[in-house]
């Protein structure tokens, strides 16, 4: 099933994390359930600078349901770079890029070939479940 939606909480977390990481880039793995992106996972050992971010895909859990990636650009260039396109090709079908000022309008989604796709932002039916998953991923409990 093609991915068409992203939870609003997931998008907000991505924007918040990107803002917090600035002037370094932020990167994570997206997970989906059916047609919707429901989680963002930051891999242990992720290294970021103001120009790039390196994710250790060997840290990806086997049962990860990874559907793609997200990363921030610290400039206002929202297009995927050549390195981004190489990476998109390797992992999943949905790739989000966010740029300053990291608000609801400063992101775009691309497919694995780097063509822009649209994702609807949807409210979660189960807010509690989503936030519990976030805190497990982020604090390693
Ligand atoms: Zn990039």
Image (cartoon, grey):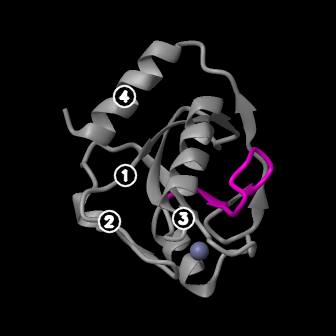
Q: Is residue 34 above or below residue 65?
A: above
115 horizontally vs 39: left or right: right
Inspect the magenta stretch and tell me whether residue 93 lies in it. Answer: yes
Helix, strand or loop at mark 1: loop
Q: State the residue position of label 3.
A: 22
Disc 1 residue: CB within 8 Å of ligand 1: no
The answer for how far apart the CA atoms under marks 2 and 1 are is 7 Å
Question: In terms of sequence position, does the residue under pointer 1 or pointer 3 come before the other?
Answer: 3
Q: State the residue position of label 4.
A: 133
Q: What is the magenta range?
A: 92-107
Q: Residue at x 48, y 60 (%)?
A: 21
In the rendered view of the protein, which quadrant contains the C terminus? top left
In the image, ligand 1 is in what quadrant?
bottom right
Do the CB atoms of the residues marked 2 and 1 lie less than 8 Å apart?
A: yes
Q: State the residue position of label 2.
A: 46
Q: Which quadrant would residue 34 be assigned to in this image?
A: top right
Do the CB atoms of the residues marked 4 and 3 lie less than 8 Å apart?
A: no
The answer for how far apart the CA atoms under marks 2 and 4 are is 19 Å
Q: Position of residue 134 (x, y in %)?
A: 39, 33
Q: Which mark is residue 42?
A: 1
Question: In terms of sequence position, does the residue under pointer 2 or pointer 4 come before the other?
Answer: 2
Q: Is residue 37 above or below residue 24?
A: above
Do the CB atoms of the residues marked 4 and 1 lie less than 8 Å apart?
A: no
The furthest residue to the left: 141
């Amino acid at each position: 099933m093609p991915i068409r939606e992203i939870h609003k909480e997931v998008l907000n977390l991505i924007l918040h994390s990107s803002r917090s990481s600035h002037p370094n880039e932020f990167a994570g793995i997206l997970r989906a359930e059916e047609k919707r992106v429901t989680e963002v996972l930051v891999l242990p050992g992720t290294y970021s600078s103001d120009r790039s971010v390196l994710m250790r895909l060997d840290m990806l859990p086997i049962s990860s349901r990874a559907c793609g990636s997200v990363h921030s650009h610290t400039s206002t260039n929202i297009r995927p770079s050549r390195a981004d396109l190489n990476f998109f090709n390797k992992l999943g079908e949905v790739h989000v890029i966010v740029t300053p000022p990291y608000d609801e309008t400063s992101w775009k989604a691309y497919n694995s070939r780097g063509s822009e796709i649209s994702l609807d932002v949807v409210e979660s039916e189960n807010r509690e479940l989503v936030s519990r998953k976030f805190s497990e991923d982020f604090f390693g409990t």
